[in-house]
Image (cartoon, helix red, strand yellow):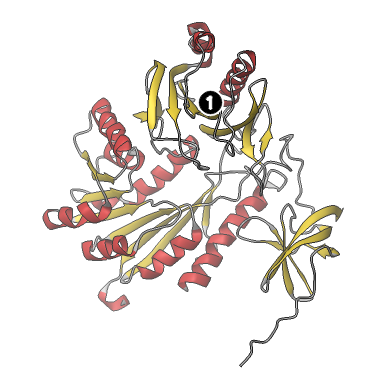
Amino acid sequence: MAKLKLKIPVKKGDRLELDIKTLSSSGDGLCRHESYTLFAPGGLPGDKVLGKVIKITPRFGVVDILKIIEFSKDRVEPPCPVFFKCGGCKFQNLNYEKQLQFKVQVVSDSLKRIANIEAPENIKIIPADSEYQYRNKGSFAIQGKGGKPAIGFFAEGTHDIADSATCDILLPAINDTKEWIRQLVVKHDISIYHERHHRGLLRGLIVRHSTSTGETLVALVTYKGRFPRGFLAELTDEKNLKKLGIVGLIQNTNLKNTNVIMGPENKVLWGKEHFIEKLGGITFHLSLGSFFQVHSQQAEKLYNQISQWTEEAKDQTIIDAYSGSGGIALWLAKQGRNVIGIEKFKPAMEDAIKSVKINGFHNCQFLTGTVEEHASKITLNKSIHTIIVDPPRKGCSETVIQTLLEAQPQQIIYISCNPSTLARDLERLEGYQVRDIRVIDMFPQTQHIETAILATRRRVNEQ
């Protein structure tokens, strides 16, 4: 039997007046024309727009907003000069309270739609005190020519850089360092990598900074080749380095044809290959590629919440899976918990072990490897109170979920940057019930969402 051909009420090139009703989980405006769903990037609920249809599929279409006829009452003026071009932030033009409401709604909808979990009516959100100038790491792409390099983030939907002297969500010290590097690149006419021709030297820049210590770590990401002596001489001039708080300059080599900025090889050009961060009285030893939350103030709030959820652990063990450079594990160790961190990225583990020694903690250890490798062994000899998982966006594998279920901890704390995979994984945690939910605004002005879930093992009468 032939499939029914769906009638799509629009065609590419059509111009339509549309009312933006809500936001999709991607942060794009969402509207309908004759019951057909249309995404309108840049549109906000309450906008009336003139849009041009640029894409159609059987299920949805996409419109390019040509003109805003009526503005939403929740619109605000974005401070960034390239906001409407850059793909880094989506919400600088949206009232902050509405940003928070959007993030809570996405989490609630995901839990209901994917896991059939009824979220509490008022999911608690932890707003940011710093809505701007908070991000402690900048990873910049570089294009163009040495005499006029474009340094910044890709424009939305393109591979072209939205160049600007400042990024409003980055710490000011990161912007200052980037612009200092820029003027040296221009002065010495450093060749810029061309991704189609695979020629040129400089292809990216990474800057990490701590406001608590004032230390900055810089990596110049390159293709094949060396920097000219004159450039290196000015780059390593200690007067400028001291002014910017730079403690280490690294050349990171990336020979692959990829969108991933960092490559596997590091060479120290000057100083150290790490910097020091301090948070809540804890000293963190952090190298270039080690994971650390990008909003330090919000990280402290997240860690405090996890500490509250594990107060009853006492002499039992807490496993911090996907522990990165050990932020959560070290925080809990300071509160007197017995913690074992597990992380497969060896440089992050080396950082975590150094941090343990710096802080003099004796109740915290780290194991290099996967959750599957170590969790089952640990549970044979220890009583596990809590397992904390903070996986990448793709969530936990089926094997990891089975490992969690076999370990049978009293509770599981799941930290997630992707509400969809969070909901999927919670549905697979049979025998556990969600007891508490927090949405932590780790990424103000963007559509990205950080969620913390406390799930406890169901009692017999709750099965």
How far across and how far down the image is residue 101, in percent?
Answer: 62, 56
Is 101 left or right of 11, judged from the image as shown? left
Is 83 left or right of 248, judged from the image as shown? right
Q: Which residue is drawn at 52% across and 13% down?
A: 228
Residue found at the very far bottom of the displayed protein: 1
Q: Determine crowd level at label 1: few under 14, some 14-19, many 20+ residues with C-alpha closer than 10 A.
A: many
Q: Which residue is drawn at 67% across and 20% down?
A: 147
How far across and how far down the image is residue 305, in percent?
Answer: 40, 47
Residue 245 higher or lower than 384, as above or below: above
Residue 383 higher or lower than 245, as above or below: below
Residue 24 higher or lower than 218, as above or below: below
Is any part of residue 281 visible from this angle?
no
Nearest the viewer among 391 and 408 is 391
How far across and how far down the image is residue 152, in percent?
Answer: 62, 33
- Picture quarter with the C terminus: bottom left
Residue found at the very far front of the displayed protein: 197
- Picture quarter with the N terminus: bottom right
Asked which secondary structure carries label 1, the reply is loop
The image shows a total of numbered marks equal to: 1
* Residue 182 in which image quadrant: top right
Nearest the viewer among 185 and 334 is 185
Residue found at the very far left of the displayed protein: 381
Q: Which residue is drawn at 64% across and 17% down?
A: 186
Is any part of residue 90 visible from this angle?
yes
How far across and how far down the image is residue 361, in percent?
Answer: 23, 32
Residue bearing the label numbered 1: 201
Q: Which amino acid does label 1 sit on?
A: Leu
Is 345 left or right of 88, judged from the image as shown? left
Residue 346 higher or lower than 96, as above or below: above
